[in-house]
Amino acid sequence: MSRPSGAAPSRTHLVLIPTYNAGPKVLETVREALGQWAPVWVVVDGSTDGTGEQLQALARSEPNLKVMVLAQNQGKGAAVLHGLVQAEAAGYTHVLTMDSDGQHPAWLIPAFMQASQAQPACMILGKPVFDASAPALRVQGRKVSNAWANLETLWMGIGDSLYGFRVYPVSPLLQIMRGQRWMRRFDFDIEAAVRLCWAGIWPVNLDAPVKYLQAGEGGVSHFKYLRDNVLLTWMHTRLMLGFVLRLPLLLARRFRGRSG
């Protein structure tokens, strides 16, 4: 289902796309998102591949597109934070985040937004459905991260901790990010889901396909196995310490159930 022609832009929910050197795929991703929802905001995180200028040119002819350019690369979480601050200032209550590299299903944006509008106090998490393009090492590795995330939240229901196709409530996420200096790089997706659960924001999981594009298809990956796995290990160490401190509260919440 595409966005009806002439439909008014949402005043509460927007699409937020952080991007860094994603190549031509980012323009395709943004156009697909605009075909499904308005408004769409893009945060260019210090890209040096010329896509920032191309996106700005597109925005001049597309009234439902806003492009923000950061002078230096700061990391995915920092780019999302920049967009969240601007979204709150403009009166938006929710943002749907999606990657700029073509992996996420733009055609599912309306369904995720409708789920958020029906349950605005929740976060809507995409639960990836993998095809044959998914690297086995990545698929197995995320199972480990998912297990840790569910332990750290006493199994509140995080279907997938890494999949970045999600709808977040702006205010609680901003409050969390402003209160500590982490969540600024690749660790953002996992830590956002866990800390929002700690704050009492329940997850709602919706299946969504994910496609890992090869270089010949325009796919670009900035994932570094050693660097990013070290980052994730440090992140889970922090989260486990936070989990121990919050254990009494989490246990009480689990006993009360979702209505607590």
Image (tube, grey):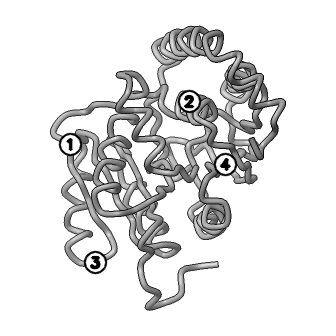
Q: Quadrant of the N terminus?
A: bottom right
Indicate the secondary structure of the residue bearing disc 4: strand
Q: Is residue 131 visible?
A: no
- Name the residue: 41% across, 37% down: 175
Q: Of the residues under marks 2 and 1, which one precedes in the sequence?
A: 1
Which residue occupies 23% across, 53% down? 68
In this view, 90 is above or below 185? below
Task: Tell me the number on the disc at residue 126.
Answer: 4
> Which element type, helix, strand or loop, lies under badge 1?
strand
**Residue 203 pos. (x, y %):** 69, 44
Q: Earlier in the sequence, mark 4 or mark 3?
A: 3
Q: Amino acid at mark 1?
A: Leu
Mark 2 — residue? 195
Measured as percent of width and height from the top left, residue 202 is found at: 68, 43
At label 2, counting other C-alpha atoms closer than 10 Å, the crowd grade (few under 14, some 14-19, many 20 or more) is many
Q: Is residue 36 visible?
A: yes
State how far apart marks 2 and 1 are (Cα): 26 Å
Residue count near mark 3 (Cα–Cα under 10 Å), binned few <14, some 14–19, many ≥20: few
- 180 or 134: which is nearer to us? 180
